[in-house]
Amino acid sequence: MIELVESWAREAGEIIKQRASEGFDVSEKTARDDLVTNVDKEIQAFLFAKIKETYPDDSIMGEEAEEGENAKIDMKKGRVWVVDPIDGTINFVLQNRDYAVMIATLTNGVPTLGLVYDVVENELFSGGPGYGVRLNGEQYEPTKKLPLNIEDGLVGHHAYMFSRDIDQVMTKTKHSLGTRIIGSAGIVLNKMIKGELAAYISNLSPWDYLPGSTILHELGYDFAKIDGGELDFHERAKVIIASPKSIEEFING
Ligand code: IPD
Ligand code: CA
Ligand code: CA
């Protein structure tokens, strides 16, 4: 299954590159800085169609789904696909880089597959239980000993939360080696896979954190709500993705 999903993501990447060269329409969703393009919608429709055609009994959640559709899905029942057609839409629109196609699956509420495709850099990470980690279709071996702890590396943050020290995200990560704010959860998590960042703390929807976190779990990382509560995979939540030691220290420290 993983190879098939990788091939869909690559096809999606080709469509995105084509549209980027032709031009596309941008519109606002909830605010001036909450953008969507016709490409986000086209890619979601493309991936939904592939999933429905191949696995008609599965459920599908997507960032650009019709109002109310995501809420109807029981995340604990059967296989659920979670799709973010373009993660980092603002980067896509303004920079034409640092965006990703992302897909995850849950099976009876347990993450089973994650995929993050950095289209511009041509880096497609995928993996999950039974798959290990793959980069561009080959088994991936990290070059550094992972997981890193917060004190040993850089932390990816959410600009709004970091600048206001919401829930002490700045104070509680002062012992890191520095901060990076990138604008795409997927690109941040790919950097964690490569050992370039040690942790990520942000306010995220399931389609933002599940694809990368499922891959990172294979490398010894974990993910949790920053208040220690249970993640339901339905709602947006403030999450930390880090080593189990750093998560424990962040929540209880
Ligand atoms: C966003 C990006 C961003 C994160 C936001 C997400 P989108 O995804 O991942 O880095 O801070 O919370 O919503 O809207 O570009 O797919
Ligand atoms: Ca996203
Ligand atoms: Ca998106």
Image (cartoon, rainbow, N blue to C red):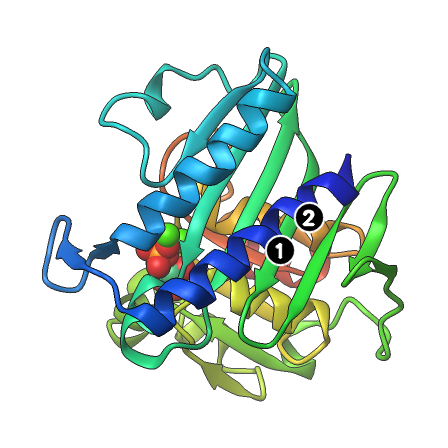
Q: How many marks?
A: 2
Secondary structure type for disc 1: helix
When the figure is inspected, residue 239 is found, relative to residue 130, above or below; the finding is: below
Task: Residue 161: tell me if it is visible.
Answer: yes
Front position in the image: 89 or 234: 89
**Residue 89 % position (x, y):** 33, 62
Residue type, numbered disc 2:
Ser
CB atoms of marks 1 and 2 within 8 Å: yes
**Alpha-carbon distance for marks 1 and 2?**
5 Å
Q: Residue 168, labelled with which disc? A: none
The residue that appears at 57% across and 44% down in the rendered structure is 103
Q: Is residue 133 left or right of residue 200?
A: right
x and y percentages locating residue 217 in the rendered image? 74, 50
Residue 226 visible, this angle: no
Q: Residue at 86% of width from left, 64% of height from top?
A: 140
Crowdedness near tag 1: few (<14), some (14–19) or many (≥20) residues, C-alpha within 10 Å: some
Ligand 1 - quadrant of the structure image: bottom left
Q: Vertical placement of 113 versus 194: above or below?
A: above
Quadrant containing the N terminus in the rendered view: top right
Cβ of mark 2 under 8 Å from ligand 3: the answer is no
Identify the amino acid type marked 1.
Arg
For residue 154, above or below residue 122: below
Residue in view at x 34 percent, y 80 percent: 95
Which residue in the protein does label 1 denote? 10
Measured as percent of width and height from the top left, residue 36 is found at: 24, 54
Mark 2 crowdedness (10 Å alpha carbons): few <14, some 14-19, many ≥20: few
For disc 1, does the CB lie below 8 Å from ligand 3? no
Say the numbered circle drawn on residue 7: 2
Image side of residue 226 versus residue 58, left or right: left
The x, y position of residue 187, in whole percent, is 53, 68
Task: Name the residue at 12% across, 49% down.
Answer: 30
Q: Nearer the viewer, residue 252 or 239?
A: 239
